[in-house]
Image: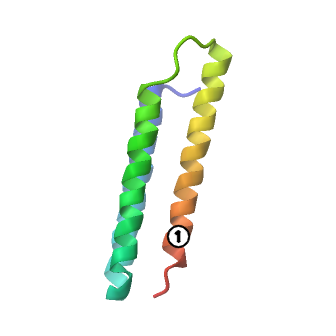
């Protein structure tokens, strides 16, 4: 398992990259989509905050196997959230 430090860096990097993609989409899309893109950006920031909060505050009193399972589930949920946000961004029409 990667260190928590590396996981946090990866999460921050992925969300930062996704937000850059949103701003690129915003620059080349009609003004009608502005509000939708801004909603997607706020959802990405919320996803990052929730995931980092869960990483910083894991459940206590669990053995090593249960902790690994917790982190794998958490990271899987984060990736699924990023994919869902990407699909929402791509579904906006130019």
Direction from residue 94 to residue 79 in the image, left or right: right
Residue at image location 42% in from the left, 65% down from the top:
40
Give whichever of 68, 36 is nearer the camera: 36
Q: Is residue 48 visible?
A: yes
Residue 12's place in the image compared with 42, above or below, is above
Residue at image location 39% in from the left, 50% down from the top:
46
What color scheme is it? rainbow
Residue 53: image location, x then y, percent: 40, 34
Residue at image location 35% in from the left, 64% down from the top:
20
Residue position marked by numbered label 1 in the rendering: 88
Report the number of discs: 1
Look at the image and tell me in which quarter the C terminus lies.
bottom left
Look at the image and tell me in which quarter the N terminus lies.
top right
Residue 63's place in the image compared with 73, above or below, is above
Q: Is residue 29 visible?
A: no
Q: Would you call the spot at circle 1 few (<14 residues within 10 Å), some (14-19), or many (20 or more)?
A: few
Residue at image location 36% in from the left, 83% down from the top:
28
Residue 70's place in the image compared with 61, above or below, is below
Residue 21: image location, x then y, percent: 40, 67
Circle 1 sits in a helix, a strand or a loop, which is it?
A: helix
Residue 27: image location, x then y, percent: 31, 80
Give whichever of 24, 54 is nearer the camera: 54
Residue 74: image location, x then y, percent: 57, 37
Direction from residue 15 to residue 81 in the image, left or right: right
Give whichever of 24, 50 is nearer the camera: 50
Direction from residue 53 to residue 64 in the image, left or right: right
């Amino acid at each position: 398992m990667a260190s928590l430090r590396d996981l946090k860096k990866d999460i921050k990097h992925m969300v930062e990259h996704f937000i850059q993609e949103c701003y690129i989409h915003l620059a080349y899309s009609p003004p009608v989509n502005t509000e939708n893109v801004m909603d997607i950006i706020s959802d990405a920031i919320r996803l990052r905050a929730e995931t980092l909060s869960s990483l910083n505050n894991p459940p206590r009193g669990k053995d090593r196997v249960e902790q690994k399972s917790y982190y794998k589930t958490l990271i899987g949920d984060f990736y699924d959230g990023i994919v869902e946000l990407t699909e929402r961004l791509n579904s906006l029409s130019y």
